Amino acid sequence: MTQFFQFEADFVESLRCIPMQVRYKLDTCGVKLKLAQWNQFTQDDRRLLVELPSNTETEVQAYREFLHHLIQERSGTEATDLAIDPAPNWLEPTTVPEIVQEKAQQSQVMITVEQWAKLTPLQRFALIKLSRSSHENANFLPALKEFHLIAE
């Protein structure tokens, strides 16, 4: 799953920020990765974290172990584990999460269940992450446009 979004274009070349596809893998494998730790990784480390698969249970476990090793190796700190949601919202195509609806409504946008269902799990994940108050939300509207949920 090597897919970058257009709204990430300003940092994809340098990978100075953690791209959504890596954040998706982090949530899938249950490891918290701080930006300070990411910044201690080499460019090759970052590319590898983008490219390594995490689709099967075996791949997810291997990704988790690799990440634990990499964080220890590069930062000298232990990785922080997170609980893994057994039924994350981004895998549920029939219900638009309230947090996403609220954020969309702030932009006078309504996301229908039909639109939500047509999105990929990674796109739904991105909208959920971009909806959180703890996240810098400047990319929410560009994501809505990129995902064809509103006109450009």
Image: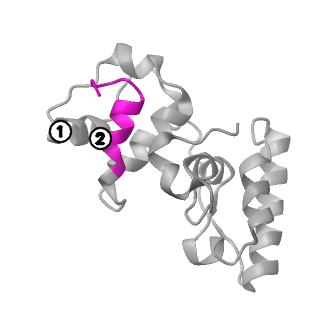
Residue 132 shows up from this direction:
no
Residue at horizontal 49 percent and vertical 55 percent from the top: 10
Residue at horizontal 27 percent and vertical 24 percent from the top: 151
Residue 107 badge: 1
Secondary structure of the residue carrying tag 1 is: loop
Name the side, left or right, on which 24 lies relative to 133: right
Labelled pair 1, 2 in contact (Cβ < 8 Å): yes
Q: Residues within 10 Å of mark 2 (few under 14, many from 20)?
A: many
Extent of the magenta region: 139-152
In the rendered image, residue 118, in percent from the top left (x then y), is placed at 46, 17
In the rendered image, residue 23, in percent from the top left (x then y), is placed at 58, 52
* Colouring convention used in this rendered image of the protein: one colour
Figure check: 121 above or below 80? above
Quadrant (top left, top right, bottom left, bottom right) of the C terminus = top left
Residue 141 badge: 2
Residue 69 shows up from this direction:
yes
Residue flagged by tag 1: what amino acid is it? Ser
Q: Quadrant of residue 55?
A: top right
In the rendered image, residue 58, in percent from the top left (x then y), is placed at 85, 42
Q: Residues within 10 Å of mark 1 (few under 14, many from 20)?
A: few
Figure check: 18 above or below 69? above
Seen from this angle, which residue lies furthest top? 114
Figure check: 128 above or below 110? below
